[in-house]
Image (cartoon, rainbow, N blue to C red):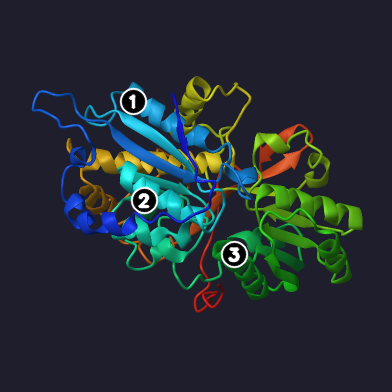
């Protein structure tokens, strides 16, 4: 399938927004076919529906997300092979936000004018979320950026991984309980200063550690985005006797931090990475540094097959040229689930879906699991502005020849009542 990639290397913010806003209220209530330039007739085939995917093909976020369109496109290809949605062919439109605070605005505005809906997998999407909200545009995708997924007025947004976000960002016990169970007593937590999600995750881990009786040796929420320079951090961790590590960073930073810790002689008893469970790290220079470490997997690993994993694996092999031994990265899982949820919204909205109908019907969706890829069902009718009742994920351990699940069942944790990291950026 041919993918259209839109870029704006000049870095100028699009000025067409004012022209479009005046018509958006009317557009949101009309069938999507009026968005195209060509007129349709009663006998014409159903018009195609364009779905935009906004991610980081370039810039600092590319290390994590540049390969993610494969998951998005494979889910679209699978749906088209099954006849599309009510006869409508789905057209993927991949847009590069360049991991740029200025380019994300251009990316979202391009999507507003060229697509029916947006699947977002971007650490900077929160900076431009208002444009899709003002346009009445459905947005699905990954909660990897900011609090807008659970904050008014962004009820047009549906996180296909978390369901929603409690804007207070309460601390949660899931991660730290795993570290404690494997001997961790002094925590080192790290987050990117530019990312509200990363910063608050690190702060929440520190608060949960204290709640569970661990000490906090290091809490660093000023890591430059995409950084791989951690020599000083490792020396500080050694000085403060850190033996449990939980970085809320992207893969390149995670691996660099692990290598720096090893080189500095930090004696770690338990390490849990939020991302990094993916094939590229196996046999890479970082592989020896992460041996025995644990990796969080929000989505069901393919080595624990069910209907959802088998559907995704078959599609990735057919459309993304995966081999039998391949498995998806976290960002490819996120892209697949984002596309899957958008497709679900289109199906719910009937044969001539509108943006408003998709938003309305997704907000009434009471049980979503991405066909069994998620550990817990999401009820979008009740979850907005709240975390899931419990947060669960599978835990994988790095061993010599690859990753092995610690258990066939996911590990679950709860929010800690009365806690909040909402004062962070």
- In the picture provided, is 395 more to the left or to the right than 125? right
Viewer-side residue, 68 vs 244: 68
Q: CA distance from mark 2 to mark 3?
A: 23 Å
- In the picture provided, is 289 more to the left or to the right than 137? right
Q: Which residue is mark 2?
A: 139
Say whether disc 2 or disc 3 marks the residue closer to the N-terminus: 2
- In the picture provided, is 323 more to the left or to the right than 237? left
Residue 329 sits above or below residue 365 on the image: above
Give the SS element for disc 3: helix
Q: CA distance from mark 1 to mark 3?
A: 37 Å
Give the SS element for disc 2: strand
Label 1 crowding class (10 Å Cα cut-off): few <14, some 14-19, many 20+? some
Q: Which residue does the image show at 82% across and 58% down from the upper left?
A: 268
| Residue 192 quadrant | bottom right
In the rendering, at what x and y percent does residue 321 appear? 55, 22
In the rendering, at what x and y percent does residue 141 appear? 43, 48
Q: Which residue is mark 3?
A: 201
Viewer-side residue, 410 vs 242: 242
Locate the N terminus by quadrant: top left
Give the SS element for disc 1: helix
Say whether disc 1 or disc 2 marks the residue closer to the N-terminus: 1
Q: Which residue is mark 1?
A: 80
Q: Which residue does the image show at 25% across and 29% down from the upper left?
A: 88
Label 2 crowding class (10 Å Cα cut-off): few <14, some 14-19, many 20+? many
Q: Is residue 256 in view from this perspective?
A: yes
Q: Which residue does the image show at 72% across and 52% down from the upper left?
A: 254
């Amino acid at each position: 399938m041919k993918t259209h990639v839109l870029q704006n290397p000049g870095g100028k913010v699009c000025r067409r927004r004012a022209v479009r806003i005046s018509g958006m209220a009317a557009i949101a209530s009309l069938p999507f076919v009026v968005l195209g330039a060509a007129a349709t007739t009663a006998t014409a085939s159903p018009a195609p529906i364009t779905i935009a995917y906004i991610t980081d093909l370039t810039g600092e976020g590319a290390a994590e997300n540049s390969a993610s369109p494969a998951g998005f496109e494979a889910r679209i290809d699978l749906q088209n092979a099954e006849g599309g949605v009510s006869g409508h062919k789905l057209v993927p439109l991949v847009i590069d936000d360049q991991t740029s605070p200025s380019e994300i605005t251009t990316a979202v505005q391009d999507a507003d004018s060229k697509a029916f809906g947006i699947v977002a997998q971007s650490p900077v999407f929160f900076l431009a979320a208002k444009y899709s909200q003002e346009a009445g545009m459905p947005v699905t995708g990954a909660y990897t950026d900011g609090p807008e997924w659970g904050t008014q007025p962004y009820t047009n947004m549906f996180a296909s991984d978390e369901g929603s976000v409690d804007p207070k960002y309460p601390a949660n016990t899931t991660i730290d309980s795993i570290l404690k169970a494997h001997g961790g007593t002094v925590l080192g937590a790290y987050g990117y200063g530019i990312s509200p999600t990363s910063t608050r995750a690190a702060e929440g881990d520190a608060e949960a550690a204290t709640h569970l009786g661990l000490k906090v040796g290091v809490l660093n929420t000023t890591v430059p985005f995409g950084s791989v320079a951690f020599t000083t951090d490792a020396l500080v961790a050694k000085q403060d006797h850190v033996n449990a590590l939980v970085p809320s960073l992207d893969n390149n930073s995670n691996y660099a931090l692990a290598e720096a810790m090893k080189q500095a002689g930090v004696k770690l008893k338990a390490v849990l990475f939020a991302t990094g469970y993916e094939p590229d790290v196996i046999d890479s220079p970082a592989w020896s540094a992460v041996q025995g470490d644990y990796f969080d997997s929000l989505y069901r690993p393919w080595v624990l097959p069910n209907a959802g994993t088998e559907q995704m694996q078959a599609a990735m092999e057919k459309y993304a040229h995966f081999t039998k031994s391949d498995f998806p990265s976290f960002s490819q899982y996120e892209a697949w689930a984002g596309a899957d949820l958008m497709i679900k919204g289109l199906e719910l909205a009937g044969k001539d879906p509108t943006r408003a109908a998709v938003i309305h019907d997704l907000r009434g969706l009471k049980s979503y699991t991405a066909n069994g890829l998620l550990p817990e069902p999401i009820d979008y009718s009740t979850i907005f502005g709240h975390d899931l009742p419990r947060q669960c994920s599978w835990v994988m351990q790095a061993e010599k020849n690859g990753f092995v699940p610690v258990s066939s069942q996911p590990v679950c944790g709860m929010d800690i009542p009365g806690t909040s990291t909402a004062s962070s950026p």
